[in-house]
Amino acid sequence: MRRGFDIRAYPGFGALTALCLVILYAPLLVVTVYSFNASQSITIWEGLSLRWYADVFTGPESATFKKAAWNSFTIAIMAATVATAIATSAATAIVRGGRYRLRTLSFGLISLPLMVPEIVTAVATLIFFSAIGFTRGYMTILLAHTAFCIPFAYMPIAARMQGIGPAFEEAALDLYATRVQAFRRILLPLMMPGIISGFLLAFIISLDDFIITNFLKGGGVETLPTAIFGAVKQGIKPNIMAISTMLLVVSIVIVTLSYFVSKSDKTD
Amino acid sequence: MAGGATTGGAARAETYAGVRNWLLLPSWLVLCILVLAPIGIMLVYSFLTKEFRGGVIWEFSLAAYDQFFCDRGLFGDEPCSIEWTYITIFWRSIWQAGAATLLALLIGFPTAFFIATRPERSRPLWVFLITVPYWVNLLIRTVSMKFLLRDNGPMNDALIGMGVIAEPITIINTNLAVQIGLFYSYLPFMVLPIYAAVERFDFRLSEAAADLYASKWVTLRRVVLPAVRPGVIAGCILVFVPSLGAFLAPDLLGGAKNFMIGSLIEEQFKGSAGNWPFGAAAAMILLSMVLVILLISARQSQRSSA
């Protein structure tokens, strides 16, 4: 190939990539910067301050935020834990169960929440709980999140399992390990990065969800996104930017963790 | 075919074939009860009679679909002529989602192409940079966009400061704001499948085209594009489908004039003013549209791989 002539380089594509990254990050950056604004108004910049972060924890709305944060995090931990267990079990059957007719159908069922528009899932679940006479609240949010999180937990787990050759468990079985032992002592440790990554993604999905929660929360129970939405309806206030920035940092830290965990020690 | 005892690949792994039904049971139970059954019940509800305090009366009725498609005059006793109110809302949603998809394609394709042609070692990092914003709370991203685009927000300030414009431009509460919001929400979905397709593309084909005196852009259009078409279609669907039923971007950025399907459905379940069968019917119509789109695209990608 001649110097200066790369068949794969197109003029402007680099610039558009830079633009794409600017578009993706600019709004997040702007809100983060303005969350440190000392001013009462969101328009005028009056210098750096942590006052709105203090306001989130001690201000007039702090009780609402704390309750919402508690709900958000407990629901996310429980939903992600159950979804990860279910996804691990399903991935074992789909990746390690040979070829069978139910396999494609099972995979389709697991991907279903990704294909159905979220608002449709929200409406359907609301109607379902109402039809069986289940009162809306914490429990309904938890159940819906668990189901919705399964495909997000499934993807990294199944991908990881596909990367592990079956020779490891088969060696264990040849040495008279039971299937349960082979799973617990061989497959599970090897799959751990996938399982952790799946759990973290499911956790974020639950933590971030607004639409399903909004339909299922009923009166009284708020999560962070519904509390923020309620507050934003009255206009964007500086304390909202502070709480948004904190949530944003939590998401980014978790995704980064998940990225490095799933990249760690590849086994083939 | 022998069992996977000696094969290294995971293709025929069947260590747990004996217990696979038990392993599948939890996912089947949870997803059938909490996703599939609710959609079935929603379909039933769309054929029930509305209860005025929110909820339904268990009596078969076509009123929801009638209200959607039929205009029966002020007193509801005229013969059916086409009701445009809801069709317009659906049409606007399709248009808005389409515009957002086009915008995402214009930025997303070059980005995906650029990333896929970086050295192999640095590609995962680029992909990571594109995906991170997706995992940030959609509500927070939409609120951030609203903050950025406001009349006296940072973007207008910056443009005025640079002397590009004299007066702030109003974007919030316009169609454009919704399009930008949807585009921003789902942009990473456009980049990833196109990236995956371009990464698999064999660039020796481009070299062959260049040797035959095709210009770069002709090569892109005639050689690269047909090969990566499934990725482009997947990207467009991943942006278009969630945009169609989006609630946050139209609600926060669009204001009352730019009503979309998501808001129409949401309104039917809010408080006592709602109409559950109508909301269920609207959700059913949205779901049918999405399923048709997915079926067509599945057939398309089957054809291009055949």
Image: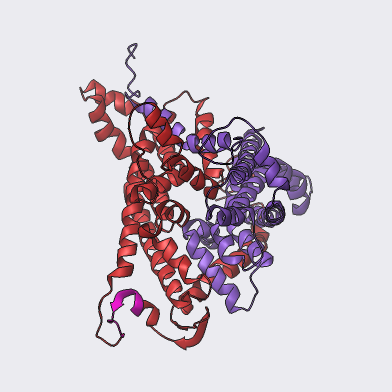
Residue drawn at (56%, 43%) of the image: B136
Asked where in the image residue A142 lies, by quadrant, the reply is bottom right
Foreground residue, B270 or B305?
A: B270
Q: Colour of chain A?
A: purple
Horizontal side of residue A161 vs B152, given as left or right: right
Asked if residue B291 shows in the view, the reply is: yes
Asked where in the image residue A126 lies, by quadrant, the reply is bottom right
Image spot of residue B67 (x, y percent): 35, 78
Q: Which chain does red denote in the image?
A: B
Image spot of residue B211 (x, y percent): 24, 21
Horizontal side of residue B61 vs A29, given as left or right: left
Residue drawn at (68%, 64%) of the image: A138
On whether residue B74 falls in the magenta region, the answer is yes
Residue drawn at (53%, 80%) of the image: B53
The residue segment tinted magenta is B66-75
- Quadrant occupied by the C terminus of chain A: top right
Answer above or below: position of A68 versus A24.
below
Asked if residue B26 shows in the view, the reply is: no
In the picture as drawn, the residue positioned furthest to the top comes out as A3
On whether residue A117 falls in the magenta region, the answer is no
Foreground residue, B222 or A77?
A: A77
- Quadrant occupied by the N terminus of chain A: top left
Answer above or below: position of A226 versus A3.
below
Foreground residue, B219 or B151?
A: B151
Answer above or below: position of B191 versus A223.
above
Image spot of residue B166 (x, y percent): 32, 33
Answer above or below: position of A26 versus B294.
above
In the picture as drawn, the residue positioned furthest to the left comes out as B213
